[in-house]
Amino acid sequence: MKILKNSKIFVAGHTGLLGSALVRKLKEQGFQNIVTRGHKELDLKDRLAVNLFFEEEGPEYVFLAAGKAGNISLCATFPATFLHENIAIQDTVFEAANQFGVKHLVYYGSSCTYPKHSPQPIREEYFLTGGIEETSEAYASAKIAGILACKAYNRQYRTNRFIALIPNTLYGPNDRFSVENSHVFSALMRRFYDARRSGQKEVVLWGTGNPRREFIFSEDVAEASIFAVQHAEELENHHYNIGTGVDISIRELATLIAAETQYGGEIRWDTSRPDGPMQKLLDSSKFLSLGWKPSTLIEKGLELTYRWFLDHEAGERK
C-alpha cells in the first residue's frame, strides 16, 4: 500500500536529528499533510493526551522518532530516566496507533541492542544472542522492548503495520553539538570548531583512534523510512538494519572533521584512555535487497552538517 500524497502523517520528534530529516524528505517527496507536535503541546508519555490526539487528528502513518537519547556517558548516569521515558513513549504511542487504526508505524531501534561481542558485520539474526554493553543496558533494554513490540503487535493482530528499523550511528543537521553530551561525530565537530576559534595548538582525543564505526546521514535514514512504508507488503515481521555498509576509523573521522572545520593544529591521542569496541558495523543486506540504498557519502554529509552547524550553532557562515 503506497502512501497517498494527501495522507495524514505524524512525525513524532520533528525537531530532532531524525525527525527533522523526515519532515524535510516527506515534503520533498510531495507529502504536505504532515502533523507535528512539540513536547509542550503533547507529552507522548501521557496516555490520555496521546489517545485524544490520535482520536482527533486521525494520523494514518506514524514515524516515531521521539524518545530519550544520548551518549554512553549519559546513558550510564541516568539509566532509569532513559529506560522509563522510552518505554513510556513506546507503550503509549503503540497502543494508540493500534487502537485508532494507524496504517503503518515506523519505530527506530539502536545498534546498541545487539550483543556487545557480536561478530562483524552485525546481522539481524544476532539480536538477543548475547549480553549487551553494560553502560547502555537500560537504554538498550527499552529499545529492545520496542523492537519486540513491533513483532508482537503484528503477530497478535495479524498485520504488518508496525515496522522496526535499526539505523547505525546517525549524524546530520539538528544534531546535538556538545563535547560532553553528544555522540562522537557531532562532539568532534564542536571540539575542532572551538579549538580553531580559540587558537588551540592541539586537541587531545581519547584512545588510539583505531576503533571503526559506521555513520549514516540522517536524510538517508529518512528516505529509508519512507521507502519501508511504501514497500511494507514486502517486509517480514522482524527488524531491519539500516546502514551504509562502510565504516571508518575514529582517527580518519577526526582528520576529516578537522579539515572541514579548518583546524590546523595537532591531534594527539591519549592511549591511556579506553577505545571501546573495535568495530560496530551493521549488515544491511536484507533491507538493501528490497531496492533502497544510501546516497550520501560521509564527505558530503560532513559538509552539509557543518554548513548547518555554522548557520544554527556557531552563528557564522563558512
Image (spheres, rainbow, N blue to C red):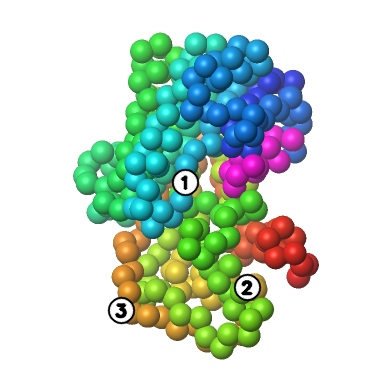
Q: Give the numbered dot on residue 273.
A: none
Circle 2 crowding by C-alpha within 10 Å: few under 14, some 14–19, many from 20 = many
**Upstream in the sequence, badge 1 or badge 3?**
1
Name the amino acid type tagged 3.
Answer: Ser
Q: Is residue 18 magenta?
A: yes
x then y, percent, for residue 31: 73, 29
Q: Is residue 84 above or below residue 98?
A: below
In the picture, residue 8 is in which quadrant?
top right
Distance from label 3 to label 2 (Cα)? 25 Å
Query: Judging from the image, what secondary structure is the residue with disc 1 in?
Result: loop
Q: Is residue 276 above or below residue 228?
A: below
In the picture, residue 262 is in which quadrant?
bottom right
- The magenta-colored residue range is 15-27
Q: Is residue 315 left or right of residue 256?
A: right
Q: Give the numbered dot on residue 193.
A: 2
Q: Give the numbered dot on residue 69.
A: 1
Q: Is residue 113 left or right of residue 304?
A: left
